[in-house]
Image (tube, rainbow, N blue to C red):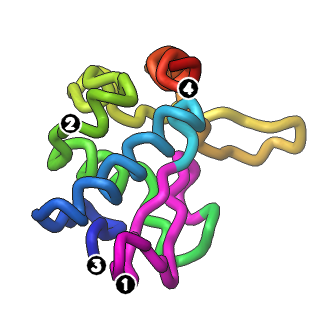
């Protein structure tokens, strides 16, 4: 297992790519979802992922293993951007306390209350990758 659903992050070069994938998913989905529980086999430069989990800003949206905001915040507290995050220009501010997952309680038209995420970071733009492809 490289990234758990409750803040666990393994160490090592193979884990860095999975850690970056989790961070990327959080930024790319505008702080709505995070890929987690990233586990499987790494062989001959290829990752085969099995039984992954999506964490949502709406707790339990993806079932019992969706640890929601708690799991997302634990990952963000433990994550340190490595070379790949920096190369992808992922926002390191997403790791700061002020930019962690924050929810607001809202009421829908039927009177049901639910948590919805507040937007906390700007959308990620893959500027550097586009430049690299041109060369």
Front-most of 55 and 47?
Answer: 47
Front-most of 13 and 58?
Answer: 13
Q: Position of residue 125 (x, y in %)?
A: 54, 18
Residue 132 sits above or below residue 111 on the image: above
Q: Is residue 40 magenta?
A: yes
Give the CA distance from mark 4 to mark 1: 29 Å
Q: Which residue is mark 4?
A: 133
Q: Position of residue 54 (x, y in %)?
A: 54, 62
Q: Position of residue 51 (x, y in %)?
A: 51, 83
Q: Residue furthest right?
A: 109
Residue 44: which quarter of the image? bottom left
First in sequence: mark 4 or mark 2? 2
User: Looking at the image, is mark 4 or mark 1 nearer the viewer?
Assistant: 4
Front-most of 66 and 50?
Answer: 50
- Mark 1 Cα within 10 Å, few/some/many (few <14, many 20+)? few
Q: Is residue 105 magenta?
A: no
- Mark 3 Cα within 10 Å, few/some/many (few <14, many 20+)? some
Q: Which residue is mark 3?
A: 1
Q: Residue furthest front?
A: 135
CB of mark 2 within 8 Å of CB of mark 3?
no
Which residue appears at 56% of the width and 30% of the height? 30
Give the CA distance from mark 4 to mark 3: 32 Å
Q: Which quadrant does the N terminus fall into?
A: bottom left
First in sequence: mark 4 or mark 3? 3
Q: Secondary structure at mark 3?
A: loop
Asked if residue 122 shows in the view, the reply is no
Q: Which residue range is magenta in the image?
A: 34-60
Which residue appears at 38% of the width and 43% of the height? 23
First in sequence: mark 3 or mark 1? 3
Asked if residue 127 shows in the view, the reply is yes
Q: Which residue is mark 1?
A: 41
Q: Which residue is mark 2?
A: 83
């Amino acid at each position: 297992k490289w990234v758990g659903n409750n803040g666990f992050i393994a160490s090592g070069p193979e884990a860095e790519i999975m850690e970056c994938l989790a961070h990327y998913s959080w930024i790319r989905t505008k702080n709505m979802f995070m890929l987690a529980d990233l586990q499987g086999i790494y062989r001959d430069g290829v990752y085969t992922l099995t039984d992954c989990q999506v964490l949502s800003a709406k707790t339990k949206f993806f079932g019992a293993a969706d640890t929601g905001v708690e799991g997302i915040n634990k990952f963000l507290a433990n994550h340190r951007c490595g070379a790949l995050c920096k190369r992808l220009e992922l926002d390191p501010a997403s790791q700061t306390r002020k930019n962690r997952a924050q929810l607001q309680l809202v009421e829908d038209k039927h009177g049901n209350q639910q948590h919805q995420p507040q937007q906390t970071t700007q959308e990620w733009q893959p500027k550097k990758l586009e430049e690299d492809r041109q060369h």
